[in-house]
Amino acid sequence: MNSLGKYKISISNIKRNKLRNSMVILAFILAVILGSIILGPVYGIQNYYVKTINEAGFNVIAIFSGNIASSNSYTLPTNFINISTMKYLENIGGVYAISPVFLAGYFSFGNSSAYFVGSNSQLKLIGSLELYKGSFIKDNSTNSNLINVDLGYNVWNKFLKGVDINQTVSLSLIVQFGFSYKYLNVKLKVIGLLSERPKIPSINLDPNNVVIANIFDIFYLFNITNYNSIPLDAIFVSASDFNSIDNLENKIVQVLSDLGYKKNVDYMIVSQKDAIYYVNNIFNQFYRFLNIIWAAILAISSLSILIVMFITVRERYREIGTLRAIGARKIDVVTMILLEGLVLCIIGIILGMFLGYIIINLLKMYYTFMQTVDNSTIIYTFSIIVPEIIASAIIFSLYPAYIASKVPPSVALRYE
């Protein structure tokens, strides 16, 4: 029996049992839709977090003062990192750039706020900051009450809408002293406007909500002359390449240890590599749980084809016996049954992909997290679940096909 003949017989049988086969197709449609809705958003959110971490800086190692155990707890260090600490770190081999971070306070804009951050020119490289307009802060202090600043995207585009470079703005800076707050009027000269960028995951600092100034200009504003007496909030270090991050991190830990700093007490160190590993590890655990749900969905849809194929084999005993009597081989019978299951599966998959794509885009209109599921994520999700559905359909069709191939022609021809 040639391939075309087997195909015609299989298609003929599918048309003959439309209602029953429609139920099988529906099962596969639901499998594709549920698979894309369950797995698609998870793939999308993971990709978003990894992409955002990669965009957060250039091979960054962040050294935070104290120990930020969670978003709601903070261990005060006994030995603060300061400007002199940074001087030791910048002499380590493999350091491409280094930048101090000092949170001087914040500006309030109604229900929103923007941090006033002191740093240096290397923050632009380390933080992968892009200028929409103007220039970035310099390393030299102006020693003036008029402070040159770069404004984060939300600050110039929303909070101070209409502000432009070379303009001067007066704002009230809120500075925290223990449990009390002090208000200080500051004059800022806008020298640069930063482009919009993603928020850094797990860190309560939105790069779009910052006002960046030279750290020594801020020290001058506060009449600070002994720079080493002021604790830094963080030091950002950039490695020369991504693969050398771990090696540089070990060197930094060693230098800080030699200086008397205790890891996870006086400081906490996190690299981009650590952050990506942490995110992937969390999602891998989540996938293990989702795979149980996906396996159940796959089993239910595949059981439908198993049951239908069994019924089909029983109903076609005489037909199978006739085919065997006129020369059809066992492999021909197996191929026909498998072909029927595969055709039903493919029809269900095509319809399921079409409906799944529409449903995901509809869900984007109502759920913010679904915005992470772009077209590439949908295609990737389909590339994962579709082969599994096809493989499952073939496997669950094998046993009915094997039973059909074992039907003796003499018995089948007498079967009523």
Image (spheres, helix red, strand yellow):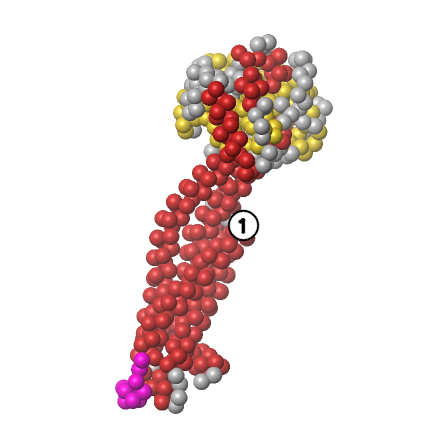
Is 333 situated left or right of 155 in this image? Answer: left
- Asked if residue 327 lies in the magenta stretch, the reply is no
The N terminus: image quadrant: bottom left
Residue identified by numbered label 1: 374
Boundaries of the magenta span = 406-416
Is residue 127 in view from this perspective?
A: no
For badge 1, the amino acid type reads Asp
- Residue at 63% x, 30% y is 124
In the displayed structure image, the side of residue 78 where residue 119 appears, left or right: right
Q: How far across and down, in percent of the image, does residue 416 sit?
A: 27, 86
Vertical position of residue 358 compared to residue 68: above or below: below
- Please tell me whether residue 113 is drawn above or below residue 324 in the rendered image: above
Q: Residue at x 61, y 30 (%)?
A: 96
Front in this rendered view, residue 230 or 70 = 230
Q: Quadrant of residue 339?
A: bottom left
- 326 or 308, which lies in front? 326
